[in-house]
Amino acid sequence: MYTVKFLPSAENEMYDIANYIVNELMNVPAGEKLINALMKARDNLKIFPKSHAVFKIVKSIKIRRTVVLNCSMFYIIDEKNKNVTIINVKHNLTDFMNNDTIGADI
């Protein structure tokens, strides 16, 4: 089993998305549903970290992506230490495909 942690910036991204849903869209149940789904996805990474495809490689580090509701969670695996680090959480409407923000913190 792997240990899973969020980079502080990824955790902030996750809560920023949820806060937008709750405070701007006024949809508390959807914000709570998103956080719960992201936490469940995090827990699944403890057992199956390689179950998602490599999204891109930065500095020879494989960044994987899992889609959770309307968001994408990006993470890296440290096989030696059995650690998974969630490096970014982005809403799928974000243009992360055409910029270099994914993996900028590694």
Image: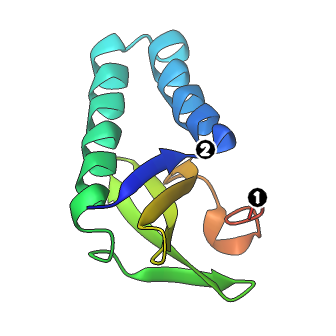
Query: How many C-alpha atoms fall within 10 Å of the one at disc 2: few (<14), some, or many (≥20)?
Result: many
- The disc label shown at residue 10, or none: 2
Give the tally of numbered discs: 2
Residue at 24% of width from left, 68% of height from top?
48
Q: Do the residues under discs 2 and 1 have CB atoms within 8 angstroms?
A: yes
The Cα–Cα distance between marks 2 and 1, rounded to whole angstroms, is 9 Å
Would you say residue 82 is visible in this rendering?
yes
Q: Amino acid at mark 1?
A: Asp
| Residue pointed to by mark 1 | 105
Image height check: is 77 above or below 92? below
Outermost residue on the bottom side: it is 60
- The disc label shown at residue 23, or none: none
Image height check: is 64 above or below 67? below
**Picture coordinates of residue 9, whole percent (x, y):** 68, 41
Horizontal relation, residue 34 to residue 58: left or right: left
**Picture coordinates of residue 20, whole percent (x, y):** 55, 22
> Image quarter for residue 97?
bottom right
Residue at 37% of width from left, 63% of height from top?
66
> Dividing the image into 4 quarters, which one contains the C terminus?
bottom right
